[in-house]
Image: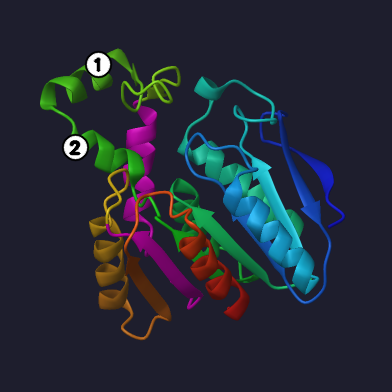
Amino acid sequence: MSLRPFELAGADGRRIRGDRAEGADRRILFITGFLSKRWGNKSKALAQWCEEKGWGFCCYDVRGFGDSEGTFTDYTLSDWIADARAVIQMLCEGLPLTIVGNSLGGWIAWLMAQEFPGIRRLVLIAPAFNMMGVRAMSISAERQHEWHTAGWMPWDDDPIHRDWPLSWRWVEESEAHWKSSFNRLRPVQTTILHGEQDTVIDPAGSHRFAEELLRQDPAFPLDLRIVSGDHRLSSPEHMELLRTIVLES
């Protein structure tokens, strides 16, 4: 695949960096999860499948993380949504766009699909709907108070997360965006793939999302698949299932 790097200026002038390849018929955009860089097993597999089909492909890092410019603590959910919007504006000319969103990237993909007519298909892997709002509700009242009053807290004390403090604005913005998640429904063909044993993002969140979506629009083209597996869904069997979903869409 002839991948080439690209740069886009964010609202603050900092650069969003990613990779893309041109193709025919359609484009696939991969949106990563929280604290994940753009190149992992799923994006590499998607790039390979796109090459086999002759489709376009794109992935990117949000500002403040990976290869993109900026400092992590300067950005919140709204900035990550703005980064997705900038990339999609670049891609939405001509070919129909499919977004594969992983974890928090799944929720961002959903929000973008309600905004851009050029997005024709969504594949949401363990989507983290209202991720920070749910997190705030799941911790003790004492820790929630500390987070609110101090203004900053890591997601948890795991070595992967403790060096990445989050401002309370993440919670406020998460709740606000969640309240508007169903405001302007577009009938975009949507598949949700979630592991039944996911302990990072509870699959009950995908069930609740599906119930609310179908309550508002019983005819919405939604396919909810709860499968055996954890948050990563990265086994050969899961990757083959993802391949089947992406290629059939």
Q: Which is in the foreground here, disc 1 or disc 2?
A: 2
**Residue 27: which quarter of the image?**
bottom right
The residue carrying mark 2 is: 138
* Front residue (pair 238, 53): 238
The image quadrant where one finds the N terminus is bottom right
Does dot 1 land on a helix, a strand or a loop?
A: helix
**Taking the image as drawn, is residue 133 in sight?**
yes
Image point 47% across, 64% down: which residue? Answer: 237
Sequence-earlier tag: 1 or 2: 2
Name above or below for residue 147 compared with residue 181.
above
Magenta residue span: 168-196
Amino acid of disc 2: Ser
**Taking the image as drawn, is residue 183 in sight?**
no
181 inside magenta stretch: yes
Give the mark count: 2
Q: Tell whether label 2 touches label 1 (CB within 8 Å).
A: no
Image point 51% across, 60% down: which residue? Answer: 236
Residue 122 placed where, x, y %? Answer: 53, 68
The residue carrying mark 1 is: 149
